[in-house]
Amino acid sequence: KSVKKGFDFTLMVAGESGLGKSTLVNSLFLTDLYKDRKLLNAEERIMQTVEITKHTVDIEEKGVKLKLTIVDTPGFGDAVNNTECWKSVADYIDQQFEQYFRDESGLNRKNIQDNRVHCCLYFISPFGHGLRPLDVEFMKALHEKVNIVPVLAKADTLTPSEVKKKKMKIREEIEQYGIKIYQFPDCDSDEDEDFKQQDSELKESIPFAVIGSNTVVEAKGKRVRGRLYPWGIVEVENSAHCDFVKLRNMLVRTHMQDLKDVTRETHYENYRAQCIQSMTRMVVKERNRNKLTRESGTDFPIPAMPRMADNETEKLIREKDEELRRMQEMLQRIQDQMHTQKEAY
Amino acid sequence: CLSNTDTCTRGGSTLLGYIGIDTIIEQMRKKTMKTGFDFNIMVVGNSGLGKSTLVNTLFKSQVSRRSAGWARDEKIPKTVEVKAVSHVLEEGGVKMKLTVIDTPGFGDQINNDNCWEPISKYINEQYEKFLKEEVNITRKKRIPDTRVHCCLYFISPTGHSLRQLDVEFMKRLSHSVNIIPVIAKADTMTIEERQEFKQRVRKELEMGGIEFYPQKEFDEDMEDKNDNDKIREAMPFAVVGSDKEYQVNGKRVLGRKTQWGIVEVENPNHCEFAQLRDFLIRSHLQDLKEVTHNIHYESYRAKRLNENGGLHPISCNDTQESNL
């Protein structure tokens, strides 16, 4: 039945412009999502803030349907002053969580749309000496909201030894700054050796050194996706050239479900818990405030609220009460849910 | 047409014998070889764009800050620093004191507002130093020249267009120093991508009114203009740097060895390094110094002397004389 319904997956790509994000997305999913894109020049980009754009594409392979949503972040890191440029990205992710939260607590839950971001590919420039301050800030702002998979962009700029050195440096810095990137689940001990080998190779390859291409070139008699230089041809799908295949396999063939699970079980639950906490706090504060105004008969006679409050204020008070009641109802429903879940276990 | 008070020169008078005027070239050459000359080059751009490597490649020696013992992997400084390193290079009996001025931290922070200010300040400070010496009553025979003769600005090869920071920097500094923009790490782009990128960059430089070196307004004559037009058409040069040698077709060449081939730095089919080097060192080195002295320095000097009070020269006995 799930195969009939098809799967959905939301992938976010982030990083400064010119790192090959669009090209990589097109290469990964063999699409042409950015065909009509107009590149802005430096003057035009001065007024731009970080945007969030969505492209959806339906992919079908061997009878399995995938509704893929790509969320892009044009403008990220392009300004002279990029303070908090990740805010709109973080807000977007939270908004998807909030929408899901409301839908989930609502009455009609059969056809909830899951627009939550399941994975964020963060593009690290191959020109730096490891992570830049902006990279660190972005990842730290988002590592508890979304699965971050760091990629080393435009890896064909680098010699094999440079790739190795940079990967090591980036991994060191990720640990040093306490950035929690997406962790591949450990394989079960009863898996076969090949699988275990593949799995450990995958872990060792972070960040994935990727190359993308929108063009097909002729290499060794075959037509492949690649880049043609005067000194040689880079083949995107050649594992000796880059980690493109590893990334694609991980994303689409082996870890898609896990990415969705972790989003649901960890990131979304974090958001939900925080939300409930802050709602509870608000409700308690309101209750206490109400208590104060009613049980005033002790020391100081608190002046009673003027009964002739005008219609505006009355309306506001009524609306606030209404909202409070709604929140309390939602809380109650959630608590009931939690009880039934607990009993089920 | 000789009179008592005027002298005039008539062009093309026929010489009745060999005078020896042409030996002035040889005399200048001898002098230059004795005294040597200074050249100060500044490099500006985000970290990791290969600035140090390129300078080392240009001058075929370890002349950058990195080679002077500073660790490559040191942390990005919180503010832009300006660090100068000097080396004496000798070739064919000619000595050159080359000073490479690095600007670590430029463009690397999250907030890069005004990150060009320390650089602008440094450039003006060198003009000020020179001016103070010049204005002295007893001046040194040869005023030490620390003025920046050339600023190589490294453009990141995004393939899209210039970044805002690039435009801001070049707009502000092209009037106080000779800026030569280069496209760094050009081996990121295919030839086609490079051509398109260059076109876009050239258009943006034009739109921003950025006068990079060689500036059109300083072309002295038609010959200059023709030569410089050709160079301006080809700029910014897309370069690759390397200090490693590999064997290609029986020759040892400077290059980068990748999985799919060797990028040869001095091969004009691979990148434009050779063009940059010829332009910078073999044809325009002296001109860069002259434009710096006759144009940029002069405008700084004029501005300073027009300010209230002007400049007070200081003599050896430390007595202050009134202004000029």
Image (tube, helix red, strand yellow):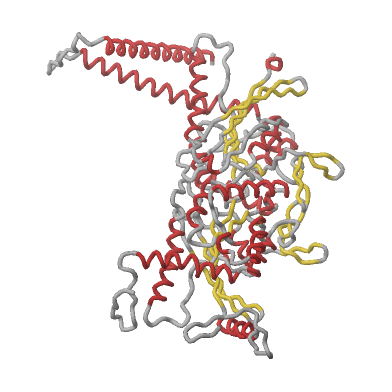
Q: Residue at x 69, y 34 (%)?
A: A26
- Is B42 displayed left or right of B266 in the figure? left
Q: Residue at x 71, y 24 (%)?
A: A59
A171 vs A250: above or below: below
Q: Residue at x 45, y 24 (%)?
A: A273
- Is A177 displayed left or right of B131 in the figure? right
Instruction: Give the percent coordinates (x, y) of residue B32.
Output: 58, 81
Work out whether residue A248 can be spotted: yes
Q: Quadrant of the N terminus of chain A?
A: top right
Quick one: A261 or B147, which is closer to the camera?
Answer: B147
Q: Residue furthest right?
A: A221
Work out whether residue A197 can be spotted: no
A274 vs A16: above or below: above
Instruction: Give the percent coordinates (x, y) of residue B9.
Output: 57, 80
Instruction: Give the percent coordinates (x, y) of residue A313.
Output: 27, 13
- Is B314 displayed left or right of B275 in the figure? left
Residue B153 quadrant: bottom right
Quick one: A23 or B213, which is closer to the camera?
Answer: B213
Q: Residue at x 48, y 46 (%)?
A: A80
A145 vs B69: above or below: above
Residue B160 quadrant: top right
Instruction: Give the percent coordinates (x, y) of residue A122.
Output: 58, 39
Quick one: A62 or B171, which is closer to the camera?
Answer: B171
